[in-house]
Structure formats: structure tokens, C-alpha cells
């Protein structure tokens, strides 16, 4: 029985009867209880109780936190723009972005790549471009836009231009 659903410690997937796919409902649930072959769920918005067959509910607990230090997270080969937290629930990966919105992906869709900024030459090229950006006078609200963007970059993919210059 769970009285408070912590999205950082549990993942609850419920099968959608129309699409026949499992969907993340963790943040919508305020109460969860396993009763034999049934799972009792109360949703936060309605406070209405729903009973699901346990085959239609998948519960994952105790995720492993992925260290994102100098790593690029890729979903189906495309980098994730802003991931503040990545939780590995085994079969599924939960990515929580800077706005605290969560996205769920099957583990087969998610890969991790070391940032090329870990290597000496790409780091030097990146730092050179960053320094040059401070001399470019593209301004917005009195601030140098290009330099501001370079300040936000913490990782760069290996297939970017930095390692190849």
C-alpha cells in the first residue's frame, strides 16, 4: 500500500484499454494498493477508486540514478535537450527535465555517450569558440546572446564539429 506516490522512487504503468499500451500514470495517482490479483488506484484529480487487474498494472521501484556528469543522453539516437535527472527502473528509463516533467522510455531506446569535452583537443576548440563568442556583438537586453548560450553548454556529442577540427 502506497499513500504518497513519489515519482522519484516508483514508476506506475497502467495499460490503456484503447491503445493496449502501458502508460505512465505515476504523477496522477495519490493512492495505490495491491490486493491479490487486483490493484486499487485512487487518482489525485478525482479521488475516485479504480480497480485494475494486476496484469494491467506494472509497478517498478527503487530506480538507479544515472550519473549525467559529462554524459549525453540519447533517445533513439537523438540527444535529450535538458535532463536534470535520469532514473533507471530496469526495463524503463524515466527522464525528468529541468521543468520537472517526466518522460518514460523503454530501455532499448536510451543510450548514453561521453561528452567530447572530456578530451583535450575538443575541449580546447570549444573553449576557443566560447572565448570568441564574447567578442560577437549580437545583443539581447544588453547581454551578449552567443556567449550566454555557450555558458549553458556542459556536454557536446562526439559527432559534433569539435572533435573533428
Image: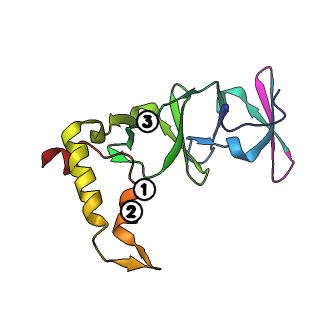
Residue identifier under label 1: 152
Task: Say whether marks 2 and 1 touch (CB < 8 Å).
Answer: yes
User: Which residue is at a point 43% across and 52% down the rendered structure image?
Assistant: 81
The residue sitting at the top extreme is 36
Secondary structure type for disc 3: loop
Q: Is residue 159 visible?
A: no
Work out whether residue 6 or residue 163 is closer to the camera in this orientation and state it. 163
Label 3 crowd (10 A; few <14 / some 14-19 / many >=20): few
Position of 164 with respect to 143 (left or right) is left
From this view, report whether residue 97 is shown above or below residue 140: above
Residue identifier under label 3: 69
Residue 46 inside the magenta-drawn segment: yes
Residue identifier under label 2: 149
User: Which residue is at a point 69% across and 41% down the rendered structure image?
Assistant: 26
Secondary structure type for disc 2: helix
Q: Is residue 73 visible?
A: yes
Q: Looking at the image, is mark 2 or mark 3 earlier in the sequence? A: 3
Amino acid at each position: 500500500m502506497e499513500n504518497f506516490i513519489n515519482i522519484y522512487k516508483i514508476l506506475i504503468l497502467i495499460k490503456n484499454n484503447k491503445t493496449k499500451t502501458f502508460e505512465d500514470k505515476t504523477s496522477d495517482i495519490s493512492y495505490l494498493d495491491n490486493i491479490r490479483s487486483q490493484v486499487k488506484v485512487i487518482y489525485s484529480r478525482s479521488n475516485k477508486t479504480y480497480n485494475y487487474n494486476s496484469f494491467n498494472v506494472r509497478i517498478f521501484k527503487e530506480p538507479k540514478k544515472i550519473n549525467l556528469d559529462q554524459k549525453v543522453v540519447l533517445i533513439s539516437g537523438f540527444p535529450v535537450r535538458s535532463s536534470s535527472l535520469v532514473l533507471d527502473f530496469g526495463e524503463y528509463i524515466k527522464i525528468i527535465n529541468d521543468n520537472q516533467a517526466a518522460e518514460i522510455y523503454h530501455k532499448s531506446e536510451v543510450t548514453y555517450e561521453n561528452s567530447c569535452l572530456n578530451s583535450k583537443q575538443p575541449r580546447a576548440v570549444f573553449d576557443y569558440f566560447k572565448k570568441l563568442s564574447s567578442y560577437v556583438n549580437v545583443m539581447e537586453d544588453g547581454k551578449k546572446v552567443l556567449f550566454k548560450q555557450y555558458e549553458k553548454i556542459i556536454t557536446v556529442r562526439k559527432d559534433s564539429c569539435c572533435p573533428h577540427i
